Amino acid sequence: MSKGFRFFIYLLERYAEHLDVTADVAYRRLAERGLVDYAIGMYELYHTEALENAFADLDRKMASA
């Protein structure tokens, strides 16, 4: 399993908490908007910044998708 994917699992769990939903609901919302690969691909940026920045980015992407 790649570092990016392992981080995505961690990010997904924390993002679900941010949304106050379960991880499967958060995953489904990202998948429905085609953002799973995007989030995995953002590993280099997301893992070096505060998670809140990743949440804000994903929130923006979710709103515009």
Image: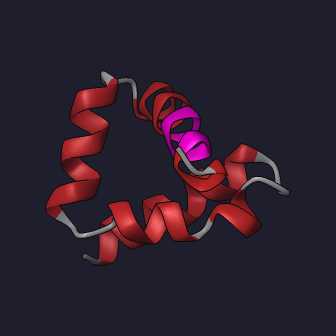
Task: In this rendered view, identify the residue nearer to me: 35 or 61.
Answer: 35
Tally the marks. Answer: 0
Percent position (x, y) of residue 33? 21, 67
Residue at coordinates 33% horizontally, 66% vertically from top-left? 35
Q: Which residue appears farthest toward the bottom when viewing the image?
A: 64
Percent position (x, y) of residue 60? 46, 69
Residue at coordinates 14% horizontally, 60% vertically from top-left? 32
Q: Is residue 31 left or right of residue 21?
A: left
Q: Which residue appears farthest toward the front when viewing the image?
A: 1
Residue at coordinates 74% horizontally, 67% vertically from top-left? 44
Task: In this rendered view, identify the residue nearer to me: 19 or 46.
Answer: 46
Percent position (x, y) of residue 51? 71, 45
Task: In this rendered view, identify the residue nearer to me: 36 or 22.
Answer: 36
Give the quadrant of the C terminus: bottom left
Q: Is residue 53 above or below residue 18?
A: below
Tell me the chief SS of the magenta region.
Answer: helix
Percent position (x, y) of residue 9? 49, 36
Residue at coordinates 48% horizontally, 28% vertically from top-left? 13
Q: Is residue 2 left or right of residue 61?
A: right
Q: Which residue appears farthest toward the left when viewing the image?
A: 32
Q: Is residue 46 above or below residue 24?
A: below
Q: Quadrant of residue 7?
A: top right
Q: Quadrant of residue 14?
A: top right
- Magenta extent: 6-11
Asked if the stretch drawn in magenta spans residue 16, the answer is no
